[in-house]
Amino acid sequence: MTEPVRVVLIEDDPIMGESLVQRLTLEGFPTVWAKTGAEGLAALRRERPDAVISDIKLPDLSGEEVFRRALPELGGVPILFITAFGEIEQAVRLVRAGADDYLTKPFPIGRLVERLKRVTPRARAAVAGPAGFARSDATRRVEQALRRVGPIDSTVLLTGETGTGKEVAARFLHAVSDRADKPFVAVNCAAIPPELMDSQVFGHERGAFTGAQARHIGFAEQAEDGMLFLDEVAELPLAVQAKLLRLLQERSFTRVGGTQLLEFRARVVCATNADLTEMIRRGGFREDLYYRIHVIALTLPPLRDRREEILPLAAGFVAEIAARFGRPEPRIGDSARLALLDHPWPGNVRELRNRIERAVALGEGDGLEPADLFPELGLTAAEAAPVASLSEVRDEAERRHILAALDQTGGQIARAASQLGVSRTTLWEKMRRLGIDRKTMEDEP
Ligand SMILES: Nc1ncnc2c1ncn2[C@@H]1O[C@H](COP(=O)(O)OP(=O)(O)OP(=O)(O)O)[C@@H](O)[C@H]1O
């Protein structure tokens, strides 16, 4: 017997809602009813349904907002909209943006059931298209959302800690988009000096500034009608943020020092590990730009929240890296597996990859052991301690020297100061800073 298709219904009209719930349940679709957009989003997160039916007009959110906000939870789950006669345009836009279908009120409930039956197998079937990157439910939702928005042109913002795979996700989006055969241009905004950012992104004309000996084609132009991936977008200086906003609004730009207006045809995908709302609060990021790039926002979860991916990812990296080094593929021993599962992975997938690469490169046996992957664990505590900074070393030496002087002078500050070649006040200050307790010293009048 196949599992029943579970539905979340988002509908504020009590009569319509009631009758839909009754009929859907009778038809074998267990249904959870949410009466506002916010309740609906919470239900989506909680219930993980197989299909969603949503009214387009809700007391708190529009259909577009429901879709945009639901997308990260929705993944490949079908969503049908119910619209009133006057909202058809919005419904058509939603279907273009990746919603599955819409029905105009009034409609016979049988038709809704029929549509529902038509769209649900799609969610169950293996998703077609390029192979994905997901190996857990958490990333599968992101991957399916990317497949869904692949064919449309809205701007996507990918967030997540460093090394979680934001660039991998952006390249995947490109691969499933209609622009897959067009350029994918990745710009690491953190790696370009702020004063060069403008000309790197928009290009410059010959003679635009000292040293501009030839025309330079910037990233916006190189992307043609492909994809422009702005990694670490929070690092853009405010002046370049203003230009990026204009680029997105007007879909045109000029090279630095140029007058010719060039059409911007690429799709923009941004990534950041910064908290942009916090940056807006502090005045480091433009709010209007945030709303432009935040049309569809998806978060790559940290590796510690998707531990089921650790071993499959590790196995994939071992195979790939051993092949690259022309070495036999080492086995990951049982205790190494446990160590991998136990590690908190602050550097996420990148850290996993780097540790495997080092272990495969340096490992001598035919298996990987915890010490190959976590060499720091084999060190004594003193060796593993982080290297002290120069100021820490200096402070420690000063502290010991002052204590010795005080010891020799029986705690007399003035004599110790003169021996040390500093004034009494300076010695007091140093003692305070270095935490030498003055009460243990014998002060003089
Ligand atoms: N799902 C995945 N499958 C295979 N490799 C992955 C996956 N996710 C990430 N990686 C690898 O991990 C490393 C980091 O990924 P990526 O550069 O996409 O992360 P990021 O989130 O963009 O990092 P940053 O914020 O530092 O730019 C890369 O070597 C990438 O190939």
Image (cartoon, rainbow, N blue to C red):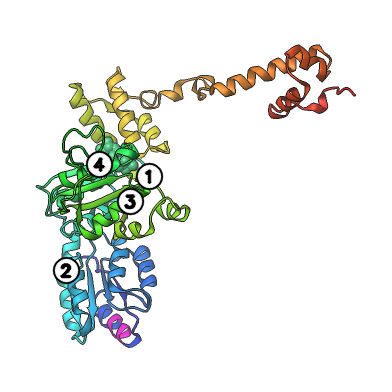
Depth check, front residue: 120 or 27: 120
Q: Which residue is mark 1?
A: 161
Residue 132 in view of the camera: no
Residue 325 image point, x, y percent:
20, 22
Task: Note whether ligand 1 is within 8 Å of mark 1.
Answer: yes
Q: Between tags 3 and 4, which lies in front?
A: 4
- Lower position in the chain sequence, tag 2 or tag 3: 2
Q: Which residue is mark 2?
A: 119
Q: Which residue is mark 3?
A: 241
| Residue type at the position of mark 4 | Ser
- The reply to whether the C-beta atoms of the residues labelled 2 and 3 are less than 8 Å apart is no
Q: Quadrant of residue 125?
A: bottom left
Q: Secondary structure at mark 3?
A: helix
Q: CA distance from mark 3 to mark 4?
A: 13 Å
Callout 2 crowding tier (Cα within 10 Å): few <14, some 14–19, many ≥20 = some
- The reply to whether the C-beta atoms of the residues labelled 4 and 2 are less than 8 Å apart is no
